[in-house]
Structures are given as structure tokens and as C-alpha cells.
Amino acid sequence: MSIGTFNCPSCSQSLTLPSSFNGTQVQCPQCQNIINVPGQGVQAVAPQPVAPQPVMPQPVASNPVATNIGKMSLSASADTGAETATRTLFNKITNEVAKVFVGQEELVLGTLVSLFSNGHVLIESVPGLGKTLFVRTLGHVLGCDFGRIQFTADLMPSDITGAPVFNVKTQEFTFHPGPVFTQLLLADEINRSPAKTHAALLEIMQEHRVTVDGESYKLDPPFLVIATQNPVEQEGTYNLPEAQLDRFMMKLIVNYPTEQQEADILKQHSQQLNLGEVLENEIQTVSSPAEINAAIKENASVRIDDALADYINKIVRLTRQWPQLYMGASPRAGLALMQGARTLAAFQGRDYAIPDDVVQIALPVLRHRVMLTAEAEVEGQEADQILTDLIRTVEVPRL
């Protein structure tokens, strides 16, 4: 709901603001003056010489506005580069995965961006959309070890990390590694376990190590946690703590496939073939952990212009001032946007990142790091739409 057309007293620039801005101060995007937004039945007043306040201008025609927000697709950017080693590797991976896993481009691209950025992925989707199939296929294509943990209410932290086991012959305790000692870990229905079990993953996801009885055990890189949660069944579930959510680089929303994609799935997977045999006979291993680690180090050299870094910083900081958001994103969100933009640029053969790289991954990086106000939740607003409106108010830099 807006207050209609509101003209700046200094430059007559036309602004459209939500009703929540009534009686507040904003900065005019045209003349940069601080102006008072009139309340109901109050006329606009002249600008006053006050100190600059946090600004949330609406996009105007003179400023370039971000497009393709949240549309994770290589076709979303026309700025492609050379046929580099990383781009060739990415194309090989996606081509092999597509032989078994149909559609879900955002899931594939988001997971690979997180993997090559040393991040982790939280997937929200209903059952039966092929998440386990995707992770198993990806592990085979990458040449990485694959592990799976089914989270339940009685799962203990030691069931994840491993625990010392007494050896009768040697009369000593020997550490037996848990299922977390792998490279691609599928944490299925992670929200069905209590907080003490979630806490076991905090150190693992951030520092890639496990500490048991004062002794630390390193995990071999690359290490990617792909956690899933069901948005429908909420009985017997536990909300992930904010510290846990912030460890995930992206939260991906996986929807049902299109009509054509679902028809292809029915034709391709209706013969009940053994998945292990299909992976061994039809899918090639096109990479290795060493090659992935080398690509991760190389992607870190992709250039981020100072103007683009400022653009990322403005988006993240604006989430802490936006009226519909109770809690904004942490500095880790800005780091995730920068590294994700680097990786996405490398996948397209560029040694520099552009604003399109940022806006494509903005929603997956930010949607789980912000909290809506009670008023916004009551009105039925969604984080994605609020973030989209927020990003459109930030002027896109011209690089």
C-alpha cells in the first residue's frame, strides 16, 4: 500500500513510498537531500539540514535497476568469457549430471556454486524430487565420496561425528569416524533432530574438522553439506538455530518439475533400473577432489571491482534497516555474495565478476539470513518478495 505520488520539495522528483514511511525521513535519489515524508493529511515540507539518515529510496527511471534477481541460470547473463579450465570442467559436470538428473537447473547450479566456493547448501522441498539421486550422481561425476545421514529425533551427536570405542585386545579406546567423514554429505530432513545434534555440525561446517575428547580430526577437502528439510510436515521438527542457518551459503527452494521435465522423468526412470549400475555404466567421472580443490583456489583470483564490492555491501547493510525485516543479514552473507559471484563468473569463463552474478545468487544467499517482522508475517509477505523490492532500490554500478 503506498501514499501515492510524493514530490521532492527541492527537485520535484516523483517518489512512491509504502505507507510505513509516513512521518519518516528519506533521502531523495535525485538530489540526495533529506526530506520529510508527510503523514496522513500532512503536506510535504522543505528539506531540513539534518545529519544523513539510513536511506531507502524507491527505484527511479534515471537509476539502473537490478533484473534477473534470484534467476540462477547461465543464460541469464550475456557476458560470457573464454573457454577456461573451470568453464570446461563445469560444462562436463552439468552434462554428465543431466544424463540422469532431469531439470532443476537452480538446484544444480546453486549446489555447484556452493561446492566451488567452500560453502554448504540447505534445500527446502517436498519429498520425491530426486535430491538423493542428485547427490549420488554428483558424487560419482566428481569422483568424491558420498555419505548420507537420516536425521531423526533420537539421533545423537556421536552418531554423526563418531566416537571412541574400547578395543578389548589393546585395552585402549580407538576413535571410529562417523558418517560425516566424507566429501559430499546429504543431511536428510535435518530439522527432525534436536538442537544438540545440530550443534555437532557447527564446527564441521565452519572449520571442516571434528573434535572429540579434546582431539581434532580433519576432514579431507572438498567438503559439502547438502541438508534438506520438508516445508509441509512440521510435526516432530525443530527449527534450525540462527547460527546453524548462517553456516549455509545458500538456501535453495526446489519446486515441482515442469510438465515436459516430468514426462522425461517418467520415461527415463520408470524401468526400475539399479542406480549403482546406471552410474557405473552410463555416467563418467570427469573430475577428482584434487582438481576441484585447484579450481577453488583459482576462482579466488576472480576480480571484484570496488564498485561491485560497495554494491554488495549496500545490499547486505540495507537488510538491517528495511522496515519489513526484523533481523538483517550478517557480514558472512556479504562474503558469500562475493565468493559466489566469483565462482559464477568463473563458470562463465570470466576473470571478473559483474552485477548480474550478484543478483542471480542474492535470494538464495539472503533468504534464510533475514527474519520478517511480526506485521509482515501477519500480512502474508514473503522474504523473497521483500528482498527483491529491497535489491531494486540499490543502484546497480556501471563497471
Image (spheres, rainbow, N blue to C red):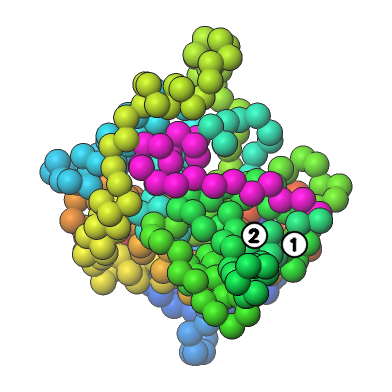
Question: Does residue 152 show up magenta in the picture?
Answer: yes
Marks 1 and 2, how far apart in space? 7 Å
Q: Secondary structure at mark 1?
A: loop
Q: Percent x, y for residue 350?
A: 19, 50
Q: Helix, strand or loop at disc 2?
A: helix
Instruction: Find disc 2 in the rendering and name its residue.
Output: 160
Numbered circle sitting on residue 301? none
Q: Is residue 293 magenta?
A: no
Q: Which residue type does callout 2 highlight?
A: Ile
Instruction: Name which residue lies at 67% across and 67% down.
Output: 168
Q: Tell me whether circle 1 and circle 2 mark residues in contact (CB < 8 Å).
A: yes
Q: Amino acid at mark 1?
A: Met
Rendered-image quadrant of the C terminus? bottom left
Toward which corner of the image does residue 303 lie, by quadrant? bottom left
Q: Position of residue 362 (x, y in %)?
A: 46, 55
Q: Is residue 106 above or below residue 18?
A: above
Mark 1: few/some/many CA within 10 Å (<14, 14-19, 20+): some
Residue 268 coordinates in the image, percent (x, y): 49, 13
- Residue drawn where x is 45% and y is 64% of the image: 219
Which contiguous range is marked in magenta? 134-153
Residue labelled with disc 1: 156
